């Protein structure tokens, strides 16, 4: 019940295209859903996060779509650039779970020219 | 803002020795710090949660006597890998959450540990 399932495992998108990564969860107590970006040999960096009271959040080229009834959320990267090539992790946590983050398995995104 | 540093960034040690890794929140006070372990091309696995001035809470399967965590202040937590063995070689990453926003975690740059 603590798992967060992430797909796809890897994704190749052309420059300028839209990259879409999906996550699904089971634990209805989760109330915070961040996305992290990680470059090789570096720690994860917080990209954008959402709470269940909204269905969408946009920051620049990054958008989270959230479907509470389906227990799914996704990251959309608009106008994808080669610099976006990295591994992306979705995560979830709950206030009553002491804020521990449960991470998805990661998606390796490659943007090709 | 919200910068977390780790030291060292890389360490190579001989089997049987102990290694200490520091995690610091540079521009904020952190109520809670977390330690993760990440194997190549895998996700982050939470090892333990530490709160300033209290004992760390370890995840199931993590040996508390092998991975010693000390959280001496609101800006510093340390992880000591005792009697390290080659299987302990991994990427260790800490994170810290702000006092006023306990769910947002900011991650350090990680420490690459190689045990020979």
Image (spheres, helix red, strand yellow):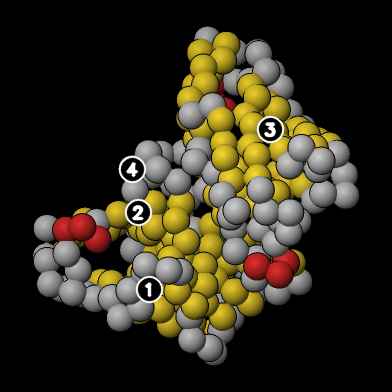
Image quarter of residue A48: top right
- Give percent across and percent down for residue A74: 70, 33
**Residue, disc 4:** B40
**Residue, disc 2:** B91
Q: Are marks 1 and 3 in contact (CB under 8 Å)?
A: no
**Looking at the rendered structure, which numbered label has been put on residue B79?**
1
Residue B57, relative to residue A9: is it above or below?
below
In terms of sequence position, does the residue under pointer 2 or pointer 4 come before the other?
4
Q: Element under label 1? A: strand
For mark 1, does the 10 Å Cα neighbourhood hold few (<14), some (14 to 19), or many (20 or more) residues?
Answer: many
- Quadrant location, the N terminus of chain B: bottom right
Q: Element under label 4? A: loop
Q: Are marks 3 and 4 in contact (CB under 8 Å)?
A: no
Q: Are marks 1 and 4 in contact (CB under 8 Å)?
A: no
- Give percent across and percent down for residue B48: 46, 70
Q: What is the C-alpha distance between the residues marked 1 and 3?
A: 33 Å
Task: Mark 3 vs mark 4: tell me if same chain.
Answer: no
Which residue occupies 71% across, 22% down?
Answer: A78
Residue closest to the eye, A70 or B5: A70
**Residue, disc 3:** A75
């Amino acid at each position: 019940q603590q798992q967060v399932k992430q797909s796809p495992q890897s994704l190749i998108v052309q420059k300028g295209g839209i990259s879409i990564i999906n996550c699904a969860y089971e634990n209805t107590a989760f109330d915070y859903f961040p996305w992290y970006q990680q470059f090789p040999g570096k720690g994860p960096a917080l990209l954008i996060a959402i709470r269940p009271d909204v269905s969408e959040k946009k920051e620049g080229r990054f958008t989270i779509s959230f479907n509470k009834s389906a227990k799914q959320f996704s990251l959309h990267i608009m106008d994808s650039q080669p610099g976006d090539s990295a591994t992306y992790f979705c995560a979830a946590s709950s206030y009553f779970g002491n804020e521990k983050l449960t991470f998805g398995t990661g998606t390796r995104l490659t943007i090709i020219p | 803002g919200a910068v977390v540093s780790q030291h060292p960034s890389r360490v190579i040690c001989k089997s049987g020795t102990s290694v200490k890794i520091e995690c610091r929140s540079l521009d904020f006070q952190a109520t809670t710090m977390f330690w993760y372990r990440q194997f190549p091309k895998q996700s982050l696995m939470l090892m333990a949660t530490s709160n300033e001035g209290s004992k760390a809470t370890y995840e199931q399967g993590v040996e508390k006597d092998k991975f010693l965590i000390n959280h001496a202040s609101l800006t510093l937590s340390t992880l000591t890998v005792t009697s390290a063995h080659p299987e302990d070689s991994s990427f260790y990453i800490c994170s810290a959450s702000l006092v006023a926003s306990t769910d947002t975690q900011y991650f350090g740059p990680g420490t690459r540990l190689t045990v020979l």
